[in-house]
Amino acid sequence: MQLLANVTQLKPPQRAGAIEVKNVGQVFKTSTQDLVALEDVSLEIKPGRFVVLVGPSGCGKSTLLMMMAGLRQQTTGTITINGAPIPKPDPDRVGVVFQEASLFPWLTAEENVEFPLALRGVAKSERRAKAQEALKLVGLDGFGKRHPHELSGGMKQRVSIARGLVQDPPVLLMDEPFAALDEQTRMTMGDELLRIWSATGKTVVFVTHSLTEAVYLADEVIVMSARPGRIVDHLQVPLPRPRTYEMLSGDAFGKLRDRIWRHIRKSA
Amino acid sequence: MTAKTLRHLIVIGLIALWEILPRTGLIPELFLPSLSSTLKAGWNEAPEYGHALAVTLYEVAISMAFACGGGILLGAIVGSLPRPRVLIMPMVSCLYAVPLVILYPVFTVWLGIGTESKIAFASIYGFLPTMLATAAGIQTIDPQLLLAARSMGATLSQRLVRVIIPAAIPTVLSGLRVGGALVIVGVVVSEMLISSAGIGYLISRYRTILDSPHVFAGVLLVLFMAIAFNALIKWIERKTAIWQTGTRAGQNAADEIGSGAVQPAT
């Protein structure tokens, strides 16, 4: 019931949120040599999909995410979100959640969530209302007045997700958001994220190191190889939703995990 | 007994000793006049001390404005831009090791023995730690915070006002605490060396005629000034930086400077 009550308060899911990456390359120039971080990466993500990027360290998956966020520009190729390129960050189209919660320690939870709205001069009362709504969505109703140091790691990451969602962007990009959390919190947060995702209908692109997390969360898993970063596999996860803990030990789950692992072992 | 009550007891004990030791003759009044005779001496010459205090406070206020304003401004530039940092920082670090008081006679030649030379000296004296702390405060800002702000569409000026300044406040305040204390030192020391007015001047003049009670009355005034300044900074810290309780990389630098681990030569 709680969940239904939350859903009715949100706008209806938007169909916007398509991501297209075409022949994207990224070269880092250093004084001694050019480092190819990404080479000819192309992929298409349909609106409302939950897509996970996995790959060994240094395969450029975070770089690719930063380019989708407009925080970094590719050397070659094009990236479009909702059909338009993204030359700089655009919080109306893309929300970003980082590994460390990266909340501003001098602001309360609700002020942190309001931050992107405050940047664009949204009125205080409207800001507060939207922040309340977002905090409720992530299950932090009543914690708005706390400062980050008074919150646990999982709660901080919830605030961070609320901040990414507060402007209701069709796309949510997540860069190893649960990497700093302990195993149990990580499991709970995964379920929470799936709940939030199905309640909002966002397109989610999620970067992780954990293969279990990848298969458990994703509609599609994109596997990348390192140096230069390339897409080596793009697999569908046919497991039904909602995902349950029991699926982790199932055959289908194991096969998908093995397939990803073989790619990664080869390139690492 | 808590540490706080113990601290209070120690202070009360020291004050009592100040009265008792000279009275019983254990310490000659010339070396340490009793608290009561010190207060009496100060009270009898109240107008003179009042005037001296006004001069000193005026010099401190102006120097404080120069030291803090300049220190924060230049510290911000040096902290955020690598090129000026490379040019200026080695120079500042060297200067920090120089006993700046050697410059004071030069200032009196340039500016006379009035308030100007004190203000010039104390400003430079307090400027360095303020600047170093500000630069450190800005350099140690978590880059993730700036990246997050950028991802939410923050412009450069929004990042400055909403992220860089609030993130740097705790470290800058620690710098102000040291810088401000040094301004007081600078003003009083320069008054004692060459001058014609101010508390330092009074202390030095009464010392030459071995009038200990009047010397100590001046010392007491300087003491109160320093304590009041420290209380003011603490109050500002409480008001602006409630979030300091969280752990943060820059906090170490702030503590180091705040606790006086980094100190200039005098």
Image (cartoon, coloured by chain):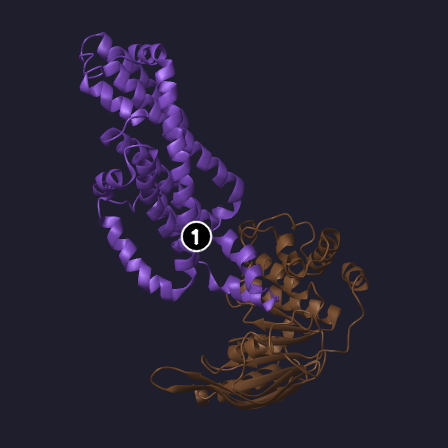
Chain colours: A brown, B purple
Residue at 32% x, 45% y is B124
Q: Decide which of B105, A166 is in the foreground and name it.
A: B105
Task: Note whether residue B25 is visible.
Answer: yes
Residue A83 is situated, as x and y percent measured from the top left of the image, at 70, 84
Chain under numbered label 1: B
Residue at 58% x, 65% y is B155
Q: Decide which of B62, B260 is in the foreground and name it.
A: B62
Under circle 1, the secondary element is helix
Q: Can you say whether B180 is above or below B217 in the image?
A: below
Q: Can you say whether B125 is above or below A70 in the image?
A: above
**Quarter of the N terminus of chain B within the rendering:** top left
Q: Amino acid at mark 1?
A: Leu
Q: Viewed as shown, does residue A214 lie left or right of B122?
A: right
Quarter where residue A245 is shown: bottom right
Q: Can you say whether B112 is above or below B218 in the image?
A: below
Q: How many marks overall?
A: 1
**Quarter of the C terminus of chain B within the rendering:** top left
Residue A35 is situated, as x and y percent measured from the top left of the image, at 41, 86
Q: Decide which of A222, A60 is in the foreground and name it.
A: A60
Residue B73 is situated, as x and y percent measured from the top left of the image, at 43, 52
Residue denoted by label 1: B73
